[in-house]
Image (cartoon, grey):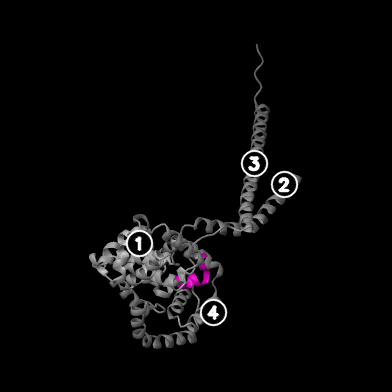
């Protein structure tokens, strides 16, 4: 009875420990397994942080900022999560949409001439400028003169302009096949010029650009850029950036182009503001391909944690160790229980065999006496 009571107490203790340790530890294990899948990772983290109040606050903030696309993204995310949106917020959003078209025409022209990209229409004008080669030629001439003159040039803008000219030439040859990469490079360059890239991404692209530029080739092509000789500058642009770096920057442009196509200019800038490197932009592109309508709201709620797991905190690591310890304790208890059941079964079989043997001896008939 004492052993049975002790076993019952141990079982209750293990059940209580499991109820305490298992849920948070298993949640952390799910996050760890989803570390390389931004879609699964963001869905897990949204389940922990998103509620009706967060959605309402996000929609109001987006409307106040004049960002109808972000408000739409929050509404899509609310629908996906079964959260109701107030009718008043929907009316405010419709009023914002009704006034948006009035600014589009002037923004397009300003974007083409000056490279300003504060809105999607302005970016469309700037993209038309860059695809034609005018915008990249302008930036290549300005930054190239600074670099060759020993001034403080922005090597990232310089590298993106050179890659952009090379991709523009390929875009014309392929009848638009390189347009997504061309648009992505233009957007990244614009955000870099406007100092809208995250500090970590700025540093990462700066390091990549510093090792990518071939200065003799830049010097040889600078004359064509200064003369605004577009044809000659396009021919020379491929030699300004070394081949390996050209491939990396082109891949960056493709990922950025995917994001722009799915989320617009503001959505892409939202990613560029939280990304640490080109890999984060690639993860955001994967998330945008799977969840285009909710990407912006997801990033607004979760930030960079929608894309990367990050390092586990000390408390998170402690929960993981606690789960491992609990699993070991459970295995040891199961082993002891198995041994106890085995011994109990053997005792019962021996007792049954002894009873059967005694019964056979008791009922065995007596042998007749010898003659």
The answer, for residue 258, to whether it is visible in the render is no
Disc 4 to disc 1, how far (Cα)? 38 Å
Q: Position of residue 66 (x, y in %)?
A: 46, 83
Q: Which of labels 3 and 4 is toward the front?
A: 4
x 66%, y 39%: residue: 344
Circle 1 SS class = helix
Quarter where residue 367 is shown: top right
Task: Return the residue at label 2.
Answer: 4
Task: Return the residue at label 1.
Answer: 250
Q: Which of labels 2 and 1 is toward the front?
A: 1
Q: Which of labels 2 and 4 is toward the front?
A: 4
44 w.r.t. 296: above or below: above
Q: Which of labels 1 and 3 is toward the front?
A: 1
Task: Return the residue at label 4.
Answer: 57
Neighbours of disc 2 within 10 Å: few (<14), some (14-19), many (20+): few
Q: Position of residue 140 (x, y in %)?
A: 35, 68
Q: What secondary structure predominates along the stretch shown in magenta?
A: helix
Q: Is 302 within the magenta?
A: yes
Label located before the other in sequence (2 or 1): 2
């Amino acid at each position: 009875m004492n052993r049975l009571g002790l076993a019952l107490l141990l079982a209750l203790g293990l059940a209580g420990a499991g109820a305490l340790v298992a849920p948070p530890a298993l949640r952390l294990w799910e996050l760890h397994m989803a570390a390389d899948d931004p879609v699964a990772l963001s869905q897990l983290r949204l389940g922990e942080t998103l509620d009706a109040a967060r959605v309402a606050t996000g929609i109001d903030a987006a409307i106040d900022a004049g960002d109808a696309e972000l408000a739409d993204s929050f509404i899509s995310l609310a629908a996906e999560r079964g959260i109701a949106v107030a009718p008043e917020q929907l009316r405010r959003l419709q009023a914002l949409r009704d006034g948006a078209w009035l600014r589009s025409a002037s923004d397009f022209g300003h974007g083409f001439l000056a490279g300003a990209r504060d809105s999607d229409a302005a970016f469309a004008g700037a993209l038309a400028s860059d695809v034609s080669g005018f915008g990249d030629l302008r930036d290549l001439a300005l930054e190239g003169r600074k670099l060759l003159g020993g001034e403080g040039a922005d090597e990232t803008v310089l590298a993106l302009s050179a890659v952009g000219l090379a991709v523009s030439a390929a875009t014309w040859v392929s009848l638009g096949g390189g347009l997504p990469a061309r648009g992505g490079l233009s957007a990244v360059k614009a955000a870099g010029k406007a100092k809208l890239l995250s500090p970590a991404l700025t540093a990462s692209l700066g390091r990549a650009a510093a090792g990518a530029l071939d200065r003799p080739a830049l010097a040889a092509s600078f004359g064509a850029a200064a003369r605004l000789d577009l044809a000659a500058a396009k021919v020379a642009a491929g030699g300004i950036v070394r081949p390996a770096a050209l491939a990396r920057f082109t891949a960056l442009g493709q990922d950025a182009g995917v994001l722009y196509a799915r989320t617009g200019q503001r959505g892409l800038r939202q990613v560029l503001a939280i990304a640490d490197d080109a890999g984060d932009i690639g993860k955001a592109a994967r998330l945008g391909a799977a969840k285009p309508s909710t990407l912006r709201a997801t990033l607004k709620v979760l930030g960079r944690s929608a894309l990367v797991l990050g390092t586990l905190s000390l408390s998170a690591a402690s929960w993981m160790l606690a789960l491992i310890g609990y699993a070991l304790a459970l295995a040891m208890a199961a082993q002891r229980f198995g041994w106890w059941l085995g011994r109990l079964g053997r005792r019962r079989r021996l007792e049954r065999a002894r009873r059967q043997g005694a019964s056979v001896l008791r009922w065995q008939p007596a042998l007749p006496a010898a003659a």
